[in-house]
Image: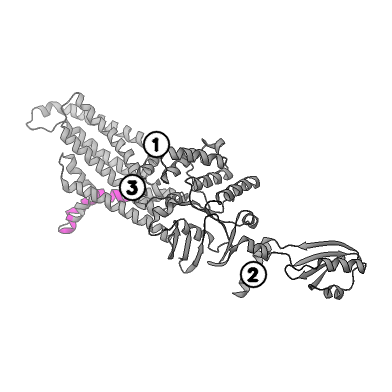
Amino acid sequence: MQVERLTRHYNEIRAVDEISFMLLRGQVLGFLGPNGAGKSTTMRMLAGILAPDAGHIFINGFDLLDKPVQAKRALGYLPEQPPLYRDMTVEEQLYYSAHLHGLNRITSRQAVADVKERCGLASVSSRLIDHLSKGYQQRVGIAQAVLHDPAVLVLDEPTAGLDPLQSHAIRGLIRELGQDRGVILSSHRLSEVQAICTHVQIMRSGQLVYTSPLADLEQQRQSTRLRIGLKTPPPLVRLAQLPGVERVEALGEGRFRLHHAVGSAPYQILVEQASAEHWGLWELTPEQASLEQVFIELILELETVA
Amino acid sequence: MITVIAARELRRLLLSPLAWALLAMIQGLLAWIFLLLVDDFRELQGRLASLDNAPGVTDLVAAPLLRVAAWVLLLLIPLLTMRLFSEERRTRTLDLLFSAPVTMTEIVLGKYLGILVFLLMTVALIALMPLSLALGAALDPGKLLAGILGLSLLVAAASAAGLYLSVLTTQPAVAALTTMGLLLALWMVDAASTVPGTTGDLLGYLSLRRHYDTFLLGLFDSADFIYYLLFNATFLSLAIRRLDDLRLRD
């Protein structure tokens, strides 16, 4: 899937402003951003539900605007609110969706049976959707999106409303699906993105402000801080003088935070000095920034730049 | 694709109590009127026999019945069409259709076809009443057929209009009311056709009733047939345009 200079206005507001990106098979792209950043608008445009004001979307080489039918054949979409008919049973809904996506009698039977098992819906297949819990409805929505084996999956907050066990299962499913197709998902939960995605993209006020493989983000969150505890601490200056240490913060009760450059933690020197000068070292922990911190830092950083 | 959507729409209607209640009401009401008409006819029969070229049972029972049927259906069709799109918009299930590989035309035609099949079944049930007279009286099959064709065309036109108005709003009740208003206005607009000049002619031409009446007389005028086709085509294409617009505005 390729997206070029996608733009969409709501009245005078630019909800999505010339964003471009690419999604390849085998990638799971996590879409992050504060509320109202334009994530859902983008997702809806990718699914062909909203028409963009400008820009192009190519799915499997087909332009979504020029050849919508061919493009949509390769697309599975789960909106924020799963599009389910409450007066249908799970099985009817899945068959209807299968037929809508051009599956015939035989292939749809296979696909429905397959997806019911994958999404754990076998036990509820003849119940009315109206009578299902939110979690199960969400699962039916996901099942519906993956039913026709699309090359591109667009999932808007796929695990919203699920309990931890269910979201764990769904994450596993998405990761598995992402191995041989492109998946793009939006989420509020950073831990989720961290767990499933291979790539991350951050949006803010309609603009794409950050795109990179998740591994790069991991790099950024490599530790640059050490927390130490000393029984008989030396003066602060002494610690600051240690080679490799850039800055020292006293945290009280014999604890200190040492800031150092990426990849050059002064473990050895610290331990040697501590034993030579009898500082009584009792704690030595690298402090790792969580993805959340990195995310907040990124957003804040961008805000100060803007 | 059209048939998939149509089948689903029909199924949904047949599963809803609303459709069955309407069907029961239509049948009950018309059966009563049918009975009254047959009774009147029986009383008149003696006097009619002495007339030359007297109106037959088709003119005195079937045609009035179909006229009333048209009225009843025009009032009730809005209740069936109101949910077509407005409910899907409200519950956001339209997203499924929009993200599926189907065109707007297929969506609209599918829904239209689904409701049409249901309504044609209703028309067939209504037609059974005058047809049952064939057991004991001489029917004029040509006249009856023309009348039934007229009713079917009218019903199709009303569904097309209802479908279009259902795309315009997210509230089924609003869709039903506006459809009812539009259909009644179009039904009665020829009352104003006494206005001299082209305005009067135009208003008369627009009227649903005037075109229906020729069918009831047993006439098949291609002008009336084309009127109904145009009526359908207009509202269906408006609905398609409008649905496409939803993706731009929403």
Q: Position of residue A196 (x, y in %)?
A: 61, 53
The residue under label 3 is which amino acid type?
A: Leu
Residue B109's disc is 3
Residue A42's disc is none
Q: Is residue A11 magenta?
A: no
Residue position for label 2: A300
Q: Position of residue A58 (x, y in %)?
A: 44, 59
Q: What chain letter is assigned to the residue under label 3?
A: B
Q: In front: B90, or B110?
A: B110
The residue under label 1 is which amino acid type?
A: Leu
Q: Residue at x 50, y 48 (%)?
A: A145
Residue position for label 1: B14
- Quarter-of-image position of residue B29: top left
Q: Earlier in the sequence, mark 1 or mark 3?
A: 1
Q: In front: A51, or A218?
A: A218
Q: Quadrant of the C terminus of chain A?
A: bottom right
Q: What chain letter is assigned to the residue under label 2?
A: A
Q: Which residues are magenta?
A: B180-201
